[in-house]
Each structure stands twice: as C-alpha cells, then as structure tokens.
Image (spheres, rainbow, N blue to C red):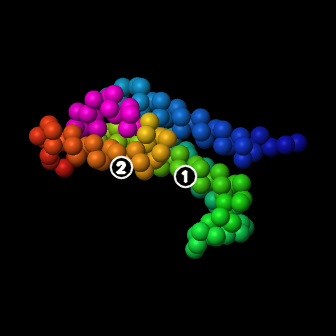
Amino acid sequence: MSSILTADALFTVAGQAATAGWFMLVFLPRRIKPLFWIPQYLIPFGLGLLYSGLMLAHFFTSDGGFGSLAEVRALFENEHILLAGWVHYLAFDLFIGSWIAQQADKIGMPRLIQAVLLIGTFMFGPLGLVLFLSIRSLFLKSTGNVKYV
C-alpha cells in the first residue's frame, strides 16, 4: 500500500495552501480581521508545521549541512529536505506578504499598487520586499507622511 503523503503530494498541498493565501491577500478585503488572519497566520503556521516535521524527520539522517555551498547542495539532494526548503520559502514569503499588505493599508497605499508588490513578493520573495520598502519610502515622502510605519 502506498502512502498518500508522498513528497509530491505534500508539495502540491503546500503550494495550493500558499496560493490560496496569496489570492486572499490580493483580492479579498482585509478589514475583516478573521479573514485576514488566514493568510497572515494560519497558512504560514500550517506550512511551518509541515517544514518542522520534514526537517525533524529527515535532517539528521541526510548528508550535507549549512557550512558551505557544497554541503547545502548535498543536503538538498534529499527530496524531503528539498521539499522542506520549498515550504520554508512558501511560509516566509506569505508571512512577509501579509506584513507588506498590513503596512501598505496603514499608509493608504492603493490596492492596485499593493497587488503588483504582493505578486512580486509571491514570485520573487525578497525582490518584492525590496520594492515595497522602496516604494513605501517614496509614497510616504510624496504624501508628506514621513513618520515611521
């Protein structure tokens, strides 16, 4: 009997959960706090649990480590560790995307600009964060609202 929880199946579920969270951030109203908590906390928490389980189950029996690029390469040859790495990206990028959305709402940034920044963060993680921080600075200067947010 084969397990339904294969690495490929977990990859699919994690990707679908993250995509649902990004959809909620971009398209749904954020003034409904319990609805916003789903992409802000619930999905990243679930992904964090999956990451933790994968790492605890496979890290100590895998080759490689974090001491050099060669060790990281060897570590990611294990498909479960590779999956954990991907889930790590999904969880942290969504959490940062939620923070971006929250901060953008606080300063009154238009949702269309937010959507571009959130999609950029979804696709390219740190690049989206860098763009948000840069645009936020320009936005605050242009509105005269230079207080720290």
Residue 56, compared with residue 131, is above or below; it is below
Single out the residue that lies furthest toward the top: 28
Single out the residue that lies furthest toward the bottom: 67
Name the residue beneath numbered marker 2. 130
Instruction: Find residue 64 and report its image quarter.
Output: bottom right
Q: Is residue 66 magenta?
A: no
Range shown magenta: 104-118
- The kind of residue tagged 1 is His
Considering the numbered disc 1 on the image, is that residue within a helix, a strand or a loop? helix
Q: Residues within 10 Å of mark 2 (few under 14, many from 20)?
A: some
| Residue at 32% in and 32% down | 113
Distance between the Cα atoms at labels 2 and 1?
A: 19 Å
Residue 26: image location, x then y, percent: 41, 30
Sequence-earlier tag: 2 or 1: 1
Left or right of 96, for residue 14? right
Residue 106: image location, x then y, percent: 24, 37
Name the residue beneath numbered marker 1. 88
Report the magenta stretch's main SS: helix
- The kind of residue tagged 2 is Val
